Structures are given as structure tokens and as C-alpha cells.
Amino acid sequence: MKKKTKKRLVAFLITVLCLGLGVAAIMVPHMYIPTISDSISISSHTSRQPLMVAHRGLSSIAPQNSIPAVEKAIEYGYDGCEFDIHTTKDGKWVVIHDDTVDAMTDGEGNVEDYTLKEILELRLDSGHGLENYENLQVPTLEQVLEIIAESDIIPVIEIKKCDVKYLPSLKKMLEKNGLAERAEIISFTREYLEAYRALDVDAEMMLLTSVMSENDIYWCVENGVDTINFHYMGFIKGLKAYRLAKEKGVRLAAWTVDNTVYKDVMVLIGAEVITTNKLIVSS
């Protein structure tokens, strides 16, 4: 084999090896649920600690948006517990992520087509750690808020799909449980945030987005929404918006950050809130 060919082959192999190691560094942490410890994070040893929010409760240990997932988020010492809400056919609030019940329960169809009584007859049949629990239901919002009210954790409530005429009942439920000032109301849907702001001028709110845009930042400023919550992988595409957020004083939050490398990067760019499926804050 000629020397030039050998050099090219060696260079090629080194490149492939480096790429392989790079991919492994990114992918391997995602394979361990939930063994990643926050103690190995660079950002754990800085003075600027972000608020750590459990995504859909501690969904890497218990089925997402279930009562056990909320309880585990409290047990493991998270600052906040994020969960998703919908309204039923009869205008009651339930905690579930998808517009349908198909993925997480033994039923089928749209959440909005079920009455509360009907949805409570379903049973969860999917999710991490399901085998450790029996007879789990789709929780009501009232059930989740009563549990959170007994702790110091922040309820981070994502409004998924609802009729805005039912938003006053959400506000009343938060007030009843002493959580109106502690809660964060979040959504991808601007209409929901605008409608809730009209009900509560002091509510803490976040606009969710995959890739933040300058338009998002201007909207936050105009509507008194102090936080933009973006998907961490969309940061590079949203650099102009990131600079504008800094300029306008809009707080940065990132979802769903599931390894310490990504967490460190988000903290370095100024994210004050980290939503995660896997990163553990205490044991």
C-alpha cells in the first residue's frame, strides 16, 4: 500500500473514531434512566443554579402525568413539577399529555369527547415503572394540586387543549389550594396565555416554543410573559431571539434537557429553568 493511501486511511479511521466517540458522548446518557446524577455537572458547582423542573412529573421513574410521577418529583427534591392539562366534554380539568387517551390508557378517542366520569373509568397501561403500580387512573387537576399544596414544589401547568371559557375554574382551583402565586402557567398556545392573563394580571407565565423567534420575544414583552421556554436543540437556530431576550429582560428556560452536557450549555447561555425527564437533583 502506498504511503499516501496509508495516511489517508489512518486519517479516515481517526475521523470515524472521533465521530463515534462524539455520538456516544451525546447518546449514551439517554440510555440510562434515571441514573444520571446532577453531581457530575459543571453547572452543579457554580453559584448560578437553575430551577430544576420534572417533566410530566418524574416520568423516568413513574408513568408520565400520573399521581406517582408527581409524588416522585416531590420526593426527589425538584424545584418544580410540570404536567399537562385538558378539559373534558363536561368542562372538567384532567392531567394528561396527548389530545387522545390512546397512548397512555386502555381507552381510545379524544379527551374532549369524554366526560370526567368516563375518563376516570379508564386505566393507565403505559409508562416507565408502570409495573410498580396498580389501578392507576388519569388524575384530575384537583387531585394533583392537593398533593402539590402539601409541598414546596412549584406547579408548572401546561395548558394543552381547552375551551377558554373554563379557564376561570383553573384560576379558582389554584386559589382554593393556595397555589395561585406559586404556579407557573405555560403553553404553546398564545390564546390560552392571553386569556389567562386577562383573568390574573399577576400570574407567572411562560411561552413554550420549539425554536424561539424574535416575534416570540416581542409577544412576551407585549403580554407581560416574563419567560420564554424553548427546546434546547433549537437554541442555535434562535440566536437572534436569544440576544433579543437578553436585551428585553425575558427570562430563558429550556426543555427537555436530559444530560448534564446539555444542561451545562443551557446554564452557560443563561437559562434559569431546566425541564428534564432524567436529571436527578437529589436521591
Image (cartoon, rainbow, N blue to C red):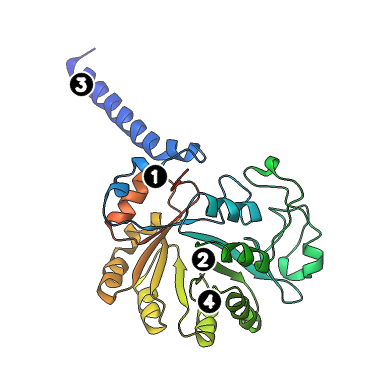
Q: Nearer the viewer, mark 1 or mark 3?
A: 1
Q: Position of residue 77 (x, y in %)?
A: 48, 52
Upstream in sequence: badge 1 or badge 3 = 3
Left or right position of 73 against 239: right
Helix, strand or loop at label 2? It is: strand
**Residue at the disc numbered 1:** 38
* Mark identifier at residue 7: 3
Q: Nearer the viewer, mark 3 or mark 2?
A: 2
* Mark identifier at residue 254: none
Upstream in sequence: badge 4 or badge 2 = 2
Q: Which residue is found at the position 72% from the left and 77% from the top?
A: 91
Q: Position of residue 124 (x, y in %)?
A: 73, 52
Say if mark 3 contacts mark 2, CB within 8 Å: no
Upstream in sequence: badge 4 or badge 1 = 1
Left or right position of 281 against 18: right
Q: CA distance from mark 2 to mark 1?
A: 21 Å
Helix, strand or loop at label 1? It is: helix
Q: CA distance from mark 4 to mark 1?
A: 30 Å
* Mark identifier at residue 156: 2
Type of amino acid at the residue the image marks with label 4: Ala
Upstream in sequence: badge 3 or badge 4 = 3
Helix, strand or loop at label 4? It is: loop
Q: CA distance from mark 1 to mark 3?
A: 42 Å
Upstream in sequence: badge 2 or badge 1 = 1
Is residue 114 at all visible to an observer of this figure? no
Helix, strand or loop at label 3? It is: helix
**Residue at the disc numbered 4:** 180
